[in-house]
Image: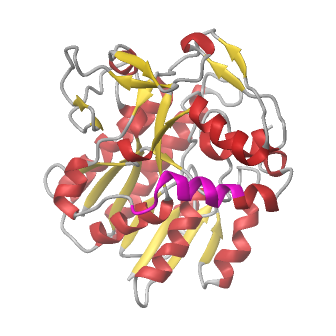
Amino acid sequence: MKVLITGICGFVGSRLALALTDRIAGVEVFGIDNLLRPGSEGNRSELSSRGVRFVHGDLRMRSDIDALPSCDWVIDAAANPSVLAGVDGKSSPRQLAEHNLGGTLNVLEYCRERKAGLVLLSSSRVYSVRDLASLPVRERDGAFVLDSEKLLCHGVSAAGIAEGFAVRQPISLYGATKLSSEIMAIEYGLTFGFPVWVDRCGVLAGAGQFGTAEQGIFSYWLHAHASRLPLRYIGFGGFGWQVRDAFHPDDLADLVVMQMHRDPPADAVYNAGGGAANAMSLAQLTAWCDARFGKHQPQPDSRPRPFDIPWFVMDYARTAKDFGWSPKRSLTSILEEIETHVRGNPGWLARCGAL
């Protein structure tokens, strides 16, 4: 089997490449990356040592994709991953659309012409910000929890947000590019007869992640806490009660491998995340860091920020039912892995452009 991974030098792309070489006998993995993200260059040597071929190119350039060899499967892991992309002053809306949607369209053309299957890594942020923000929550033990005694909308339960939750606007410009990519990928697959899987990924976390405050929050928080960099509890009263779940790229790799050995159903959109067992608030994460790196108190900032939500946990029940999949790595083990990386890599956030 030959597998092409886009964004192969990013955190998720590189970890998937290494995981596939361990999980699929005789697999040939190669990938493309524009090395735009600071720190991504550092993943090339490890990939090369494992026999993974790297091609320097940009998905926005059709000629770069046309020059790639054929493959059996494409894993599209290339994207601007920040929910604030296009409005944060670091990238324009046009750049965001060209990266996240234009790049995917070029990948779809490649799949159509080369008869390759596609695993599109999408995002939990395709779900409606307005509906998420209006979920009834209350505080318990320094974290927001869903108030199940109140009326809940379709697609949400104590287990989290399921695939049936609303995807109506607003979902952010970033979310719009990912949802548009999902729609186009499914339509291309049905129209031109190649298999397409869509995985809506929650927060991925692990050692070596290029974490920022906008994405990769678990990695960012540990590195910033240990380095005594300023941290803030933004919005929701400034208490740090907002909650997210997380899972490891190795667990995502397990799901992707199963998908590449199956034919997708008509509705091949699946949630992948850590779930309720792997969820934590920022305040709880700070307490975890305090116990390992010493006290470091974030500053409260009650001003709201666009697209922030108080509680988001991925419900992966459908994925578990259809694949027998659930994350094997606990959130504690992931944090401990990041902690080891923090201690061995001082100044990491500066090196990967997070500051």
Q: Is residue 263 above or below residue 131?
A: below
Residue 354 in view: no
Query: Is residue 332 one of those drawn in magenta?
Result: yes
Overall secondary structure of the magenta section: helix
Left or right relative to 270: residue 120: right
Q: Where is residue 6 in the image (x, y as percent from the top left)?
A: 52, 60
Quadrant, the N terminus:
bottom left
- The residue drawn where x is 65% and y is 47% is 219
- The residue drawn where x is 14% and y is 57% is 265
Q: Is residue 165 above or below residue 52?
A: above
Left or right relative to 129: residue 158: left
Residue 298 in view: yes
Which residues, given as a range, are shown in magenta?
Answer: 328-339
Q: Position of residue 324 (x, y in %)?
A: 22, 64
Q: Where is residue 284 in the image (x, y as percent from the top left)?
A: 57, 34
Q: How many labels does the image show?
A: 0
Quadrant, the C terminus:
top right
Q: Where is residue 110 in the image (x, y as percent from the top left)?
A: 41, 62
Q: In this view, does 34 lie above or below 257?
A: above
- The foreground one among 152 and 210 is 152
